[in-house]
């Protein structure tokens, strides 16, 4: 039982629920690979989960999305997969290349800090409105 978790019972089994805003940054940061698998119905946009992962310093492996690829450098700040076989190959590759995986996660974190912070997004919106 970890502080910040809520405990419960489900069908006779002990369960532990992660408190999203308190623990997910730690989960994203400590996971070797964080997957973002968008629903097929989501055709555009940068997924909030992708931003959350990178803002936590986690390594992101996502399905391909144009906006994500326009905002970040694939293979340098995050990576994407094109199909199931590519996903499996990239998981195997990044698990066996921890230094490269950590460098990519650090570069994604850096990009979020400079270009996707609340301050920079607000400034961009105000500039567009003026």
Image: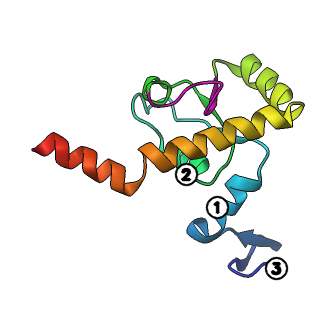
Q: Give, as a single range, the part of the protein colored magenta.
A: 71-80
Pointer 1 and pointer 3: residues touching (CB < 8 Å)? no
Gap in Å between the C-alphas at discs 1 and 3? 16 Å
Pointer 2 and pointer 1: residues touching (CB < 8 Å)? yes
Name the spot of residue 77 as percent of width and height, x first. 61, 33
Q: Is residue 50 visible?
A: no
Q: In the drawing, does residue 110 fall left or right of residue 98?
A: left
SS at circle 2: helix
Gap in Å between the C-alphas at discs 2 and 1? 9 Å
Instruction: Work out whether mark 1 precedes mark 3 in sequence or the reverse, and give the earlier one.
Output: 3
Name the spot of residue 5 as percent of width and height, x first. 70, 77
Q: Which mark is residue 24?
A: 1
SS at circle 1: helix
Count residues near mark 1 (Cα–Cα under 10 Å), then give few for <14, some for 14-19, many for 20+: some
Instruction: Work out whether mark 2 precedes mark 3 in sequence or the reverse, and give the earlier one.
Output: 3
Front-most of residues 10 and 62 = 62
Q: Which residue is mark 2?
A: 52
Q: In the drawing, does residue 82 fall left or right of residue 115?
A: right
Q: In the drawing, does residue 22 fall left or right of residue 15?
A: left
Count residues near mark 2 (Cα–Cα under 10 Å), then give few for <14, some for 14-19, many for 20+: some
């Amino acid at each position: 039982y970890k502080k910040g978790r809520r405990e419960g019972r489900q069908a006779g089994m002990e369960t532990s629920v992660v408190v999203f805003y308190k623990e997910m940054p730690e989960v994203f940061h400590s996971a070797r690979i964080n997957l973002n698998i968008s629903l097929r119905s989501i055709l555009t946009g940068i997924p909030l989960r992708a931003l959350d992962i990178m803002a936590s310093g986690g390594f992101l492996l996502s399905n391909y999305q144009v906006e994500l690829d326009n905002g970040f450098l694939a293979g340098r700040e995050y990576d994407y997969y094109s199909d199931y076989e590519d996903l499996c190959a990239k998981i195997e590759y990044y698990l066996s290349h921890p230094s490269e995986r950590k460098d990519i996660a650090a570069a994604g974190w850096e990009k979020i800090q400079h270009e996707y912070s609340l301050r920079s997004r607000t400034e961009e919106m105000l500039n567009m409105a003026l």
